[in-house]
Image (spheres, coloured by chain):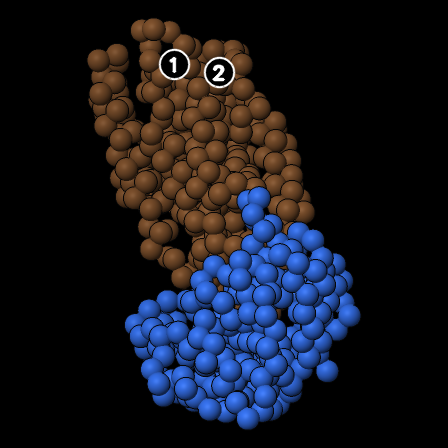
Amino acid sequence: MTTIQLKKVTKNLGGHDVIRDVSMVMHSGQIYGLQGINGSGKTMLMRLICGLIRPTRGEIRINDEVLGREITFPKSAGLLLESPAFLDMYSGFDNLKLLALIQMKIGEQEIRDTLRSVGLDPNDKKKYRKYSLGMKQRLGIAAAIMEAPDIVVLDEPTNALDTSGVEMVKEIILAQKKRGALVIISCHDLTLLRSMADEIFVLEAGSVTDHLMIPDTERGHLP
Amino acid sequence: MKYIKLLRFDIRNGIAGNWGLFLAPVILAVFAFTELKWRVSALWVYDATYENFTLSYADCLVYTYGGMAKYIPNPTNPFQFPARWGGTFLLLFLFTLSYPVRDMHSFGQQVLIRSQSRLAWWLAKCTWNLLCSVLYHGLITLSLLCVCLATGADLAGEAHAEMLCLVFQTTLTGTAQYTAIPAAAFFLPAVASAAISLLQMTLSLFLRPVFSFLAVSVLMVSSAYYLTPFLPGNYAMFIRHVFFTMEGVTVSAGYYASVSLIAAAVLAGSIRFHRYDIIHRE
């Protein structure tokens, strides 16, 4: 059981509050949506939760451990932040293999399975630099989910994807929820978020302006 | 264990993955040798023996890392930055800055989070940086050796101090009795360069990366302008050593200063990176 708790988190950058007094609680087995226009603070909030940046005020607890004090990063997290970034000179498979070598949680077979699940061919020798935008996005999602992390953070996961790609992302996200992961996704499209998320936090100028609980009847339908 | 994994990752991607950039030291070495050969042959106006002078390997090393003689401000003697010497170092600094910055804002974030340790990540980058400096200067040294072998230069001979002073338009001062340069001195430019490179990487955590590069560029220009042991660029200039200049820097001071700077940069960077916000600033 994973719980993320944000207590009055504020992040100030260059004298400007990019995140202001945000409090929220998230639990595993749920999908949380962050919705807002560009610059509303979605990505910054995700960076805070991943431990890449530190709050100016307030604290973030992951399973009762304070991020940045008791733990440096969430112990089990997969992320796709902004645009996916991989090493140009390697294939998608080789990129994921390099990442998997750090924690040694999974082997080649799991990497192949993950690549197939996002619609990429694990035997494709094409270098990452020759990937289309859609393929890059799929590889980014694969990197985030391949080690079955407790926390999955996906920033605009449907970017650069066609309709079938969006459907695939939705299936992947729901599969993560089913296995008990805590999923956080950001999207500026509220209708799309409503079709997946259990709860949505609406952000405006770094503050949470609305918290929507999505009824079961609304979920599972693509717009 | 994490550190070893991260270091292997950096070596694979930051060195092996960028092998093209390591062609530069080979080109720089060939260029320095050719330039020295040409400048020595032009010395025949002072002494006819220079027309068919046999260079030694030590001459080539001293010339490549010579820098410039002590500058004495004078209206008739405008300051001229030793461009080839400066370029040799600044090219390395550009490379040792671009990879860590690029990595931190792209693939490296995934690596960092999986490693669970900011300290291991930072120490791996510092070690990678040191290895880059050693490899870069090692390649220059090796390339010079190859060129010397190919052209029949004297491999075992000592540096010709009087010839080098003529080339650098200075005179032997101080003891006036030139003694052989100790082997330890030949490693000093690489060690001083590693120290400045690490200083730059640490500065990039406090300033924007472009400003940290500008800061070390200013440091190199200042080192050329002022002969003082407090500006580490002086240790990377052979012609500023006590072998050639009375008030020159010593090899031991160079090692003390460089190692202290390396330790300070690693430590300051570790402390800073512990709370550093990883946001793309450029």
Q: Which residue is mark 1?
A: B170
Residue B198: image x %, image y %?
54, 43
**Is residue B35 left or right of A71 when viewed as pictured?**
left
Cβ atoms under marks 1 and 2 closer than 8 Å: yes
Q: Nearer the viewer, residue A110 or B24?
A: A110
Quadrant position of residue B152: top left
Indicate the chain on which mark 2 is placed: B
Q: Nearer the viewer, residue B261 or B172?
A: B261
Quadrant position of residue A210: bottom right
Quadrant position of residue B169: top left
Up-down relation of residue B173 to residue B158 (above or below): above
- Indicate the secondary structure of the residue bearing disc 1: loop
Colour given to chain A in the rendered image: blue
Chain letter for the part of the structure drawn in brown: B
The residue shown at (39%, 22%) is B68
Q: Nearer the viewer, residue A44 or B267?
A: A44
Indicate the chain on which mark 1 is placed: B
Residue B245 is marked as 2
At label 2, counting other C-alpha atoms closer than 10 Å, the crowd grade (few under 14, some 14-19, many 20 or more) is: many
Residue A18: image x %, image y %?
56, 54
Q: Could you tell me how far apart the alpha carbons at marks 1 and 2 are, in whole angstroms?
A: 9 Å
Q: Nearer the viewer, residue B153 or B29?
A: B29
The residue shown at (45%, 71%) is A188
Up-down relation of residue A144 to residue B218 (above or below): below
At label 1, counting other C-alpha atoms closer than 10 Å, the crowd grade (few under 14, some 14-19, many 20 or more) is: some
**Is residue B40 left or right of A215 when viewed as pictured?**
left
Indicate the quadrant containing the C terminus of chain A: top left, top right, bottom left or bottom right.
bottom left
Q: Residue furthest top?
A: B75
Indicate the quadrant containing the N terminus of chain A: top left, top right, bottom left or bottom right.
bottom right
Can residue A3 be seen here? The reply is: yes
Give the mark, 1 or 2, whose residue is nearer the N terminus: 1
